[in-house]
Image: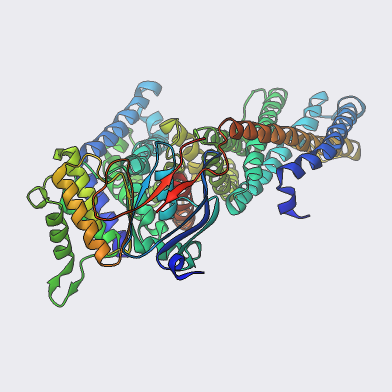
Amino acid sequence: MNWQALANPARFKRLSDRLLPWFAGGAALCLAVGLYLGLVASPPDYQQGDSVRIMYVHVPAAWMAMFVYANLAVAAAASLVWRHPLADVAGRAMAPIGAAFTFLCLATGSLWGKPMWGTWWVWDARLTSVLILFFVYIAYMALNSAFDDDTRGARSSAILALVGAINLPIIKFSVDWWNTLHQPASVSRLDGPSIHASMLTPLLLMAVGFTLLFFALALVRMRAGLIERRLAALSYTRSADAGVASFR
Amino acid sequence: MSATLALLRRDLSLALRNVGETLTVLAFFVIAATLFPFGIGPEPQILARVATGIVWVVALLASLLPLERLFQSEADEGGLDQLLLAPAPLEALVLAKCAALWIGSALPLIAVSPIVATMLQLPTEAYGTLLASLLLGTPSLALLGGIGAALAVGARKGSALLALIVLPLAIPVLIFAVAAVEAQIGGLSVRPHLFLLAGFAVFWLTVAPFAMAAALRQAAS
Amino acid sequence: MTGESAAGLSGRELACMRGGRTVFAKLDFGFAPGDLVVLRGPNGAGKSSLLRVLAGLVAPAAGTLAWHGADIAEDPAGHRARLQYVGHLDALKANLTAREHLRFHAALRDMGARDVGGRDVEGHHIAHALDMFGLAKLADRPARFLSQGQKRRVALARLCVAPAALWLLDEPTNGLDAEGVACLAAAIADKREGGGIVVAATHLDFPGGQARTLTLRAAA
């Protein structure tokens, strides 16, 4: 695909017009079927009972938290390398969606923790890593909106997104290590038991549904962002021949 | 090279002349650490158990304090443009600023850390490792803080924003620094932890100059 | 390219965007060695922005900027080394003296203490710069004890401690008294005689001899 062509706002709008219904429809379908299979049709776990069903939201949300951050990092790199406004708009559009998935993962993790461990919060290695990822999303959004000039916010937060991207593996490693140091090994992992095929189908459907939902939401937010920029530019556009009146 | 050294020398002599700022950071470090006995009680066993964590967490918070002025004052006074227009690479100049920050605020903090550790009943055999962990860990904090400070130049929500940016990224340093001291107390080898801290410092030493320079270039445009 | 536009600093179709709006566009000019160019125009016409573009601090949104016909985007470090910029801020540290500021600036511009033939070249340059701007008696006073005009003189004296082929001055006479303006005029005349280019943004009468004027139009 020609990235430069896609980066043209008008072409982006035409492309997103065509893609949006497919993303939105596909997301609705996958999530509906996935939720039905996960919450109703799949068997309860012999140990955890019905609370295992939280997994069908929790685990795909955790995947999305990382997947959206990867997209954010790509947008950040594009913003810094090509300095294209569309990449700036994309970063700003995607971050709150990623933060929402991350929060969903934390909230469902907490809900799962109560029946499993008898407490709303456990410093489980994965949950802790996701929590720190959530903090990085917050920092990104705070920095992105901290400047009067949107472009400055976009560039600054893009640098942060990349610094975060190279640091996240280190954080993950450190938290895993810290966790084995402090946690007794008896705490079972949040993935639940080994996955049976009847569980895998709804899990994958939910993951695909979340991904399509992310793309649909990102497209809507990017279009809104582009319109916002156009409006801002229009409100103080000056005649194109502003410049030299005389030079002698 | 001479430009980088000149900047380091200038910032150090400024730190020496504004010694009050350093003292404020040190006072914060000591006062914040002494809050913990009030919060969790003065029992020596409990304090000894959490002393390392308190010293490190409070040192981390104290190291945030001078960051807000690091590049913001240069931007406010116009000096940032002069640094950007210097023939020397900006990456080297920002490193000089971080080095001056480390010498000017982290070293004094390390120097008073034994006092705080004593008040918190840290076992005597752990002092050496605490100092080593601070010496190896604080360069990462200064570099990481430099990134945050450079990113936040001209931002509307100064210091809280800096904390949001810097603290999550500093967690690995905190984990292994505290682990080093606890390993010492537990009679285990501290070298792997200290090597990792040194590794983090090298990592940020290679990443931070480019991130800071990129952030400052776009801050000026 | 014609000789006129190739020598010195030339701009073609330059445009500048700030915060999503066009500050200026389609700007063409050629500044020749020895030129003093005065940028004029009402507030907000883009004088400071143009100076920042000329300095390379801000990348132009369109068009090219060339030095002796070579695009400066190809060699930003070379461009930085050949210019000196005095912004509308003085870039002074309250606790450093005038002499310390000049010494630091000389080092920053890679003119650090080099002993050539037994002479303290740096000290010589600094003493000359202090003299040039009437600062000899104030040389060891911290900047916080200097008046607004005296601070401006220190900022301008920086121009004389390191060589540069191009001076970019943003409202250089702000806060200066008549004597200070005369000092600046003399420094500019010297620079032009040596083949330097001086570009200054101002909305007042400007010293420094015969000048060319580039007028930026106000917002439409």
Who's the residue at 29% across and 32% down the image? Answer: B30
Q: Position of residue C123 (x, y in %)?
A: 14, 63
The reply, left or right, for residue C196 in relation to residue A16 is left
- The quadrant of the image that shows the N terminus of chain A is bottom right
The reply, left or right, for residue A61 in relation to residue B145 is right
Front position in the image: A47 or C35: C35
Q: As displayed, is residue C11 above or below residue A189?
A: below
Q: Position of residue B162 (x, y in %)?
A: 44, 36
- The quadrant of the image that shows the C terminus of chain A is bottom left
Q: As displayed, is residue B22 above or below residue A108?
A: below
- For residue C124, what is the image quadrant? bottom left
Front position in the image: B130 or C75: C75
Q: Position of residue C172 (x, y in %)?
A: 27, 46
- For residue A109, what is the image quadrant? top right
Q: Position of residue A163 (x, y in %)?
A: 54, 48
Q: Mark yes or no: residue B180 visible.
A: no
Q: As displayed, is residue B153 above or below residue C169?
A: above
Front position in the image: A146 or B162: A146
